[in-house]
Image (cartoon, rainbow, N blue to C red):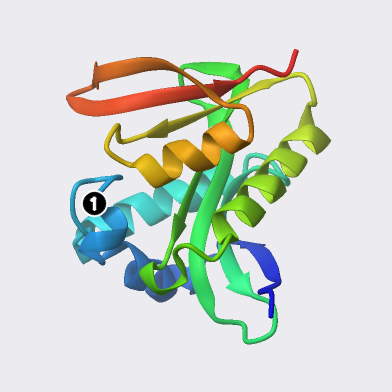
Amino acid sequence: MTTQLTFKKYTEEDFSDYLNLVKEDDLMQYITGKGLSETDAKRRFAFILDLGQQHNALGYFQVLDTATGQIIGDCKLVFYKRNIHIFEIGYLVRKEHWRQGLGTKICEYLLSQASTVNKENDVIAVIHPENIASRKLLEKFNFESYFKGNEDGTTIEKLILKRS
């Protein structure tokens, strides 16, 4: 049976769900290196809520199993902080849901959402270079790697989907 997904923009009431995701070391290893403390999660969540108010179709979203309402991860579609004419996507899936094709469904949703806002904006994803599963997922959608290195003290790889 295929899992149907629902995407819901975060609201203030969702902090405990968010914390339960981001405190997990295995989920955060390629994002922040380790799970977030409650203090760091609160700071980041405040930023997420603020960002979500800036545009209806953009922000951070809970990824829910439509049938059960269970949170299986989260994702983001935002303007890239270094160029507002480029979208940035990101995603996070609970370990028990890995290798079930859900990353593909999340990317499909994010790219479709991006097209409703502006179909010509390029889309980037910033990953950890060791996150092979994420790179393969992005390459499936024709993202191409264009940067590997250190940025703001973090080792990253950037991939871009050219759409214009």
Q: Quadrant of residue 57?
A: top right
Image location (x, y in percent) of residue 72: 50, 71
Does 9 sit above or below residue 139?
A: below
* Secondary element at tag 1: loop
Q: Residue at x 66, y 62 (%)?
A: 7
Image location (x, y in percent) of residue 93: 45, 61
Q: Residue at x 72, y 36 (%)?
A: 114
Image location (x, y in percent) of residue 102: 58, 61
Q: For label 1, count other residues whose C-alpha is less than 10 Å away and answer few (under 14), some (14-19) or many (20+).
A: some
Does 144 sit above or below residue 74?
A: above
Q: Quadrant of the N terminus?
A: bottom right
How many numbered discs sit on the rendered protein?
A: 1
Is residue 89 at least partly visible in the picture? no
The residue type indicated by label 1 comes to Gln
Does 136 sit above or below residue 143?
A: below
> Residue beneath label 1, please?
29
Pick the front one: 63 or 16:
63
Q: Residue at x 69, y 84 (%)?
A: 67
Image location (x, y in percent) of residue 107: 62, 46
Is residue 117 at least partly visible in the picture? yes
Q: Residue at x 61, y 82 (%)?
A: 69
Side of 96 relative to 160 (left or right) = left
Residue lying at the far bottom in this picture: please name it. Answer: 68
Q: Quadrant of residue 135?
A: top left
Side of 105 relative to 99 (left or right) = right
Side of 63 relative to 39 (left or right) = right
Q: Quadrant of the C terminus?
A: top right
Pick the front one: 139 or 67:
139
